[in-house]
Image: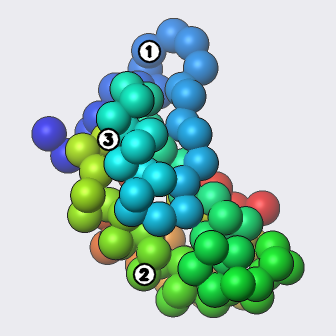
Amino acid sequence: MRTTTKFRQLLKENGIIQAPGAYDCLTAKLIQQAGFPAVYMTGAGTSVAQLGYPDLALASMTEMVQNAATITEVLDVPLIADADTGYGGVLNVRRTVRQYERAGVAAIHIE
């Protein structure tokens, strides 16, 4: 079953979806192995762990999507990703959504 379908099923259930934050494949796998139904790719964690930058919107959309794509390759549970501010205006947000979809991300949040 696709992780997007799994995520939709989780949304239909009563209760809170617990999705601890991961910043790479290892932390994502550990979260999955601990039995959580979903994983959240943290923007701050990704920025610091992958690039050495503070969480000040310095990581590009391309860098964040690449990290998400790498993480989705090792997961069987849905990945929810931080999409920062959408990385620009309306057209950029549309592109951001499509890139995260192609990366296999089940959901994003935009600040």
Answer yes or no: do the residues labelled 1 and 2 have beta carbons within 8 Å? no
**Alpha carbon distance from label 1 to label 3:** 16 Å
Mark nearer the N terminus (1 vs 3): 1
Residue 48 point in image, percent of width and height: 70, 75
Q: Distance between the residues labelled 1 and 2?
A: 30 Å
Query: Quadrant location of the C terminus?
Result: bottom right
Q: Disc 2 and disc 3: Cα gap in Å?
A: 18 Å
Residue 69: x %, y % from top left: 35, 72
The label number, if any, that marks residue 104 in the structure image: none
**Looking at the image, which residue is at 76% across and 84% down?**
53
**What is the crowding at mark 3: few (fewer than 14 residues within 10 Å), some, or many (at least 20)?**
many
Visible in this render: residue 86? Answer: no
Q: Tell me the quarter of the picture where residue 1 sits.
A: top left
Image-quadrant location for residue 101:
bottom left
Relative to 111, residue 103 above or below:
below
Residue 77 numbered tag: 3
Mark whose residue sits in front, 1 or 2 = 2
Q: What element carries label 2?
A: helix
Tell me the residue that label 1 is attached to: 13
Give coordinates of residue 9: x percent, y percent.
34, 26
Q: Do labels 2 and 3 touch, CB within 8 Å?
A: no
Q: Is 26 in front, or is 61?
A: 26
